[in-house]
Image (spheres, grey):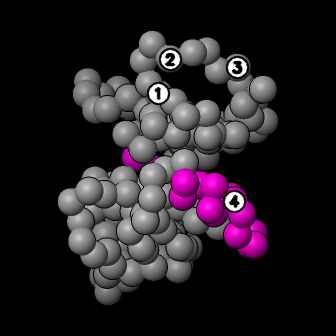
Amino acid sequence: MRKIGVHLLGRRLYETMLYWETADQNPELDDADREWIALWNPLPKVVFSTTLSAVQGNARLASGGLAEEIERLRAEPGEGDIAIGGATLAAEAAALGLIDEYQAMVYPVLVGGGIPFFPQNESRVDLELVETRAFSSKFVHLRYRVVR
């Protein structure tokens, strides 16, 4: 999270992450949760939605399409990566060829549903492994660069 300059979210993920806007009021939070809040809440966010009329916290509604927003953000001065969250939004970015790097956090649990992050029947995307990191919490962070 420390290397992210702005986070793009679809509506469903945005609504899920709203929890963190007030989570710091919970006295039972552990240090890791408090650290997450300190990173997440001030992070600029752009929400893509056709149904929301307003957003909270350090977020704004996207004023254009995904390609337009990414082009605008890349042209702005500033540090940090553009992160994309939400399966539908990530699949759209992948289909448009807008992703330079894939980072995934894998937790060893199998679930039988959900929306795939990667569009089906799309063209092949070759990836180069950049980093692998295992955490004591069983999470594994995988970082791949798109080979063009």
Query: Does the stretch in magenta take in 28?
Result: no
- Marks 2 and 4, Cα distance to the nearest angstrom? 25 Å
Question: Between tags 3 and 2, which lies in front?
Answer: 2
Image disc number at residue 126: 3
Does the rendering let one see residue 37? no
Q: Tell me, yes or no, whether the two marked residues, 3 and 2, touch with CB atoms within 8 Å.
A: no
Which element carries disc 3, helix, strand or loop?
loop
Judging by the rendered image, the residue that carries numbered circle 1 is: 118
- The location of residue 93, given as percent across then percent down, is 52, 40
- Marks 3 and 2, Cα distance to the nearest angstrom? 12 Å
* Quadrant holding the C terminus: top right
Judging by the rendered image, the residue that carries numbered circle 2 is: 122
Q: Tell me, yes or no, whether the two marked residues, 2 and 1, touch with CB atoms within 8 Å.
A: yes
Judging by the rendered image, the residue that carries numbered circle 4 is: 74
Say if 141 sits above or below 36 in the image: above
Q: Looking at the picture, which amino acid does disc 3 mark?
A: Asp
- The location of residue 8, given as percent across then percent down, is 49, 58
- Marks 3 and 4, Cα distance to the nearest angstrom? 23 Å
